[in-house]
Amino acid sequence: MKTECIKTEGQKKNNKSGEKGQALLLILVLLIVGIIIISSSFAFIGTSIKTNKVYINNTNDLYAAESGVQDGTYNVVNQSISGLNTLFSTPPNNIYNNPTYADYDYNNTWNYNLLQKVNNDSVSVKIKNVWVPLIDDNNPSWFPTVTQLLPPDGVITPPSPTEANSIIGNTNLVVSGVVTSAASKIYKVNISYQGSVSLPIISIGVWLPQGFTYNTGSSNLQGIYSTEQLLKCAGNEAVVWTFSSTTFSSLLTSLGQAGSGNITLAITFTYSTSLTSLPYALAWIVNTPVGTIQTGFPYPYTWNADIKVYDLISDAGNTEVEAYVPTSETRELGDAISGDYVAAGGSLMVIGNGYTPMNDPNSDYQGTRYQLLSDSSSIVSTIPSDASLVGAYLYWSGWIDSLSKPLSATYGENVNFEINGNQVSFNSGGNPNRGNGVVSSTKDQWRSNAPTGTGYSYSCYADVTELVNWELRQENPTAANYSGNATYDVGPAAGCTLGVIGNAWSYAGWSIIIIYSGPTTLGHQLYLYDKFSYADNGMDIDITGNTTGPGGVISGFIVPPQVTGDVNAAKLTAFIGDGDWCFSDDFIAINAPSSYLSNPLTIPDSYKLWDGINLPAPTFWKPYGDPGLPNTASQPDNVWNSYSQTGGAADGIDIKTFNITWASGLVKSGDTSARIDLPTAVDSWNFVYMILSFRSSVSSGGAISYIIRGSHQ
């Protein structure tokens, strides 16, 4: 039987038939999955918020701690010792009971707090001087190796502040350094030694700050040293060369460098860096085995004290940041003063009394002064207005015609001193005041120098810093600072003769040195020499007073690297009494070779300083003595000619400033001493003072080495 399936309208098959209740199940499944997803999302969002909060807190703490490092860096770079001590002792920092800060104290830590919170965090900063040289004061003959970076007792002991000051203060052995070519990345270490050239050398080392690496085998010591090692040191690395049976003399010969007496070893090497800054490298030398004493330098080692490294630790919230900060600052040796100076002054005598000015046929050919002035004034106006006066030193000098008129309140010792027209002095209680009081000398010096031995020249000195500051404060009580710009006037006090006229020896004059310091003038070191000396015919005096000549060597300074834009490496001002225009063959020379010592008058012009005055030749020559010469750049003789740099006769004195340019090559970066010759052939004169100024910049160097730590929670 045949079966047919008949399709009719209204009887279509329902695919869902027989599946009643499954839709609800799917909906429930989807709901459960949605709840799980939504719950997980909320849980993730909550976790993200918590994590982000911790991240933000740590970031805020990090920024706050880094601000402490930045503040500490600014302070160690820009503050003087007194400024740091003020920082460490003012509230709220006095809670730390900080010790007095000292450059060479490597055992103490100094603490201070930022005055304001940063990111709601209180920030505390610790500062410590880092002893960088790999030298153990307990055992200087030990030197580190890659496998034994520390001495046997496990600790490198630095010198005490007293010993460190003594070592650095002894300028017989000085270490310094400078980049000689930034393009070729060449660094030079200068080791200057005055004394026996047999001084032994055990090891020499150089530390490089972070961002700089030593190129192995690049030094000029190749083939001379026993070992060359690259060692970890103070956040980066140091290279140390050791030697066997080596002395200054033998090393000098091995390096092909000449020298005797005052010698300087020049050690060069190359470095690598991706930074544009220059490395503030710190070099040192170990020269004497423990227990032995060497003539001329009684210490077993020394180092480049121009480079200081500070360890800064800043705490904020839960974060601590530690940084090694290298700085460069020319060390203050001897009587160095931070700041800069100007010098002014004038003569208290003129030809006068019917005689016409110099270079006229009717004037006295020997430059005799015939009239004593009642006073003379000089204006100081070049000090920056934002500077503050640090020191004011007054000198006056003259000639008295008889040894029976001794230097006293009657002869030489007292002067009238005016500032901006107001006479000032110290009263009986030692306080500044205006009135008719006098300024008295606190340092008298004199020398018998007349042909018959019956007369003498003298120099007097008084520190008038307090008087100048006091007077300027009276004139402007609300001023933020007092720079020292003023009109200064000096004259003989009543009852006191400053000089005797009418003789070829006659002269009298004065000078004031103003030392100032300010935001634009902090980078200088000053050295003042005022050993009163008499230069007779044919002499070449030593301005230090250490020898009788010929010439002399000044030391106790370090010439820093040239700063971009600087023209002058140094400047100096001299105060000379009784220089005469009619006698030539007197000059000032810097660093002339020792071969000229036997006859300083033969020193070539290339070593002489010119005063900047094109003094023309006189229209006549007197038949007496040397006919004289003009004073020009090409003929820098006759420098002590009583002719001022303002273009007029000073009559009997010279107060002259000389600029020593980098281009001249007379002074070089790294120099620690300079020879100064002041020879005279016919003329005789008196040396009162000489002040020298060297540029010295203080700034952060290289890259700061950071160590970031999570807090001790």
Image (cartoon, helix red, strand yellow):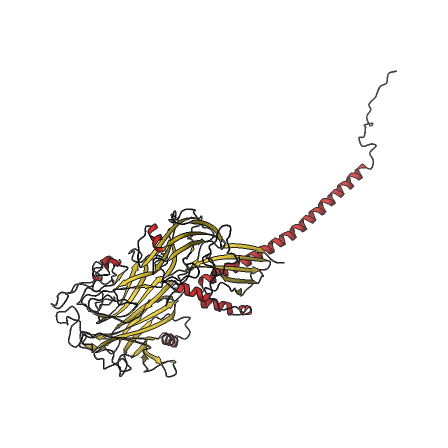
> Which of the image's four quarters has the N terminus?
top right
Splitting the image into 4 quarters, where does residue 56 fall?
Answer: bottom right
Image quarter for residue 593?
A: bottom left
Counting labels gives 0
Q: Is residue 356 visible?
A: yes
Report whether residue 80 is seen: no
For residue 292, side relative to residue 157 (left or right): left
Q: Is residue 650 left or right of residue 420?
A: left
User: Based on the displayed image, in which of its 4 quarters is residue 572 positioned?
Assistant: bottom left
Choose between 178 and 376: the one closer to the eye.
Answer: 178
Above or below 193: residue 582: below
Q: Position of residue 341 (x, y in %)?
A: 34, 67
308 or 121: nearer the viewer:
308
What residue is drawn where x is 73% and y is 43%? 34
Q: Quadrant of the C terminus?
A: bottom right
Point out the residue furthest to the left here: 623
Residue 213 horizontal/vertical position (percent): 45, 49
Q: Is residue 257 above or below residue 686?
A: above
- Residue 100: x, y in percent? 49, 69
| Most distant residue in the right direction | 1
What is the x, y in percent for residue 121? 58, 61
